[in-house]
Every structure is written in structure tokens, then in C-alpha cells.
Image (cartoon, rainbow, N blue to C red):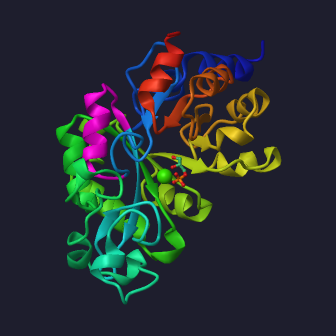
Amino acid sequence: MHARAIAATTTALLGTAALLTPTSHARTDDVSGQPEIIAHRGASAYAPENTLPAIDKAAGLGFTWVENDVQRTKDGELVVIHDDSLARTTNVEDVFPGRTPWKVRDFTAAEIARLDAGSWFGRAYAGTRVPTLKQYMRRVEHNHEKLLLEIKNPELYPGIERQTLKLLSNEGWLDHRHRGRLIVQSFSADSLRIVHDLRPGLTTGFLGKPSVGSLHRYAGFADLINPSYTSLSAGYVATVHRFDGPHGRPMGVFAWTVDDAATARTVARYGVAGLITNKPDVVRAALNGS
Ligand code: G3P
Ligand code: CA
């Protein structure tokens, strides 16, 4: 077998552990051959997404990888929230009724800190706040978790890549003690390229499914290709594995958002290195055969 084909096959069999060597930021300790399980927006089926309770819940269920979404307030604070509007996941419409369409970038950090980001999900979470990225990183650290950080809507926030990396650096997340605990991803290839250029050692993931003909370009700045599972096939995963990423190892695939057992088993068989899910316990049970 050709050396590249052997490497690709090994990657498929060993998942992230083979994809990422000890010098990589995304090295993991998992040698089970199963994909990593990443709690999407935290364990967001069981606690309000992108909040501290959601990552506490993931930790409580025994999961180490969590995913989040980072955006920026009017006065330049990085905050963790998915939508570009505060309306769906907070009570902003009640607190600031005249401020439609309630865009994150139109509110100060102090204003956002007043919002309830938990009641929409359940009464037990009333009073939960939209975390700043700084608060969030400290809780990830406290929980001994690992982070798949998404830079969300970067076109709305010029310079968010440098600012995010600065915060991560200030919090110690770019030092050797955090090796293997951080991946930065984005739907924006431009944004990801900026991250790679600013911090070449960092592990990165492109969200989407580039054409096979363009994969060689993504290999210049992305270690991972992270498509929706609905668009994925075993053939595409194998093709991704044939390209070496920016750190000289075959690119891998993290698939999202896989929430049922049958899909988890099917997509795992494609040879993905990670499964991103709102229900990590369901995926774990599926992969363990229960
Ligand atoms: O991590 C994958 C997933 O988060 C991408 O989609 O919309 O949930 O941020 P979205
Ligand atoms: Ca996301």
C-alpha cells in the first residue's frame, strides 16, 4: 500500500489520536479508535446552550470536549453565544423592548450581563448569564475540559481573530500546558487563514464541505474539515485523509450535529475523528454498543 494510503487508513482507524501528534495542540489521549465526542454548545440538549451550566453538564456526564461560539459586543467584549441576535436565547425583548433586532454587536457587555440566558430553556436555569469568553475559559479550565472554539460571524467583527487569540494567550491557553486541549474552527476560510497565520502551531478546523478539487487549498491552513453529517460519506472522509494538513499530518473530519444512535454509528464508520453532538451521552452509548 502507498505510504499516504497507509497513513490515511491509520488515521481513520485511530481517529484524533493518530491525526494529531504530541507536538500538536489537538493531541488527545484517546487511543480507543473511536471518534472524539464533542458536546455541541456544551451539553445543549440538557442545559441552555453556550452557558456555563452547559459545560458543567458536559463535564458531569464525563465528557471533556465542548464546543462554543464566540462573538463580540458593541464595546468590544468577547462573549459566548450562537446567534448574531440575542432574541432566541435571552430575555432581551423584555429587558430592552425598543432595541429590535437585538443584535449582539449593538449591545454593551454590561447590558448583555443583565440578560437571562437560561429561562427560555427551563425554569431551573433562570438567572443564567451569557458568559464572556474570559469567564467561559476559566470554567473550561476549572472543569479540566477541552475546547472546540468557533469564531462565529467573523465578517461582523473585524479583528476578532487576533483579539480571541490574545485572550486565549492571556488565559494561558496557548502555552504548552494546554497542548491538545484547543481547536479553533470557523465557517469562514478567511478567518481561519488569519488564525493560522497569527498562530501557526494551533490546530484549526474548517466548517463546511469544500469540493474535492479545492481541498488542497484548505490543507494549507486547516487540520480538520468539519461538515454537517447530512452531507458526508465514507468516500469524502477518505478523500480528506489523503491530504496532509498544515502540520504535515493527514487532515481529519469532525461531523456535526449527530444526536441519534443510528446516525452516530453510521458516521463513525465513515472514519471521522470527531462527532459533535447536543447529546453526548446518546452518542457514547451508541459507540459503546448499548
Ligand atoms: O461545531 C459545529 C457546529 O457548531 C456548526 O454549526 O450553527 O451550530 O454553529 P452551528
Ligand atoms: Ca458552533
Residue depicted at 32% across the width and 81% down the height = 107
Side of 243 where 37 appears, left or right: left
Residue 23 screen position, x and y as percent: 40, 32
Q: Please tell me whether residue 51 is drawn above or below residue 58 in the rendered image.
A: below
Quadrant assignment, res 256: top right
Q: Please tell me whether residue 145 is drawn above or below residue 188 in the rendered image.
A: above
Q: Nearer the viewer, residue 157 or 24?
A: 157
Side of 157 where 169 appears, left or right: left
Residue 181 screen position, x and y as percent: 34, 37
Inspect this view and state whether residue 100 appears. yes
Inspect this view and state whether residue 176 appears. no
**Residue lying furthest bottom:** 98
Residue 30 screen position, x and y as percent: 42, 19
Q: Please tell me whether residue 71 is drawn above or below residue 28 in the rendered image.
A: below
Quadrant assignment, res 261: top right
Q: Which of 176 and 215 is in front in this view?
A: 215
Residue 87 screen position, x and y as percent: 42, 71
Residue depicted at 70% across the width and 52% down the height = 217
Q: Which of 280 and 121 is in front in this view?
A: 121
Residue 52 painted magenta? yes
Q: Please tell me whether residue 125 is drawn above or below residue 100 in the rendered image.
A: above
Residue depicted at 59% across the width and 57% down the height = 187
Side of 190 where 141 appears, left or right: left
Residue depicted at 45% across the width and 33% down the height = 279
Quadrant assignment, res 27: top left
Side of 213 where 38 appears, left or right: left
* Range drawn in magenta: 50-65
Residue 196 painted magenta? no
Total of numbered circles in the picture? Answer: 0
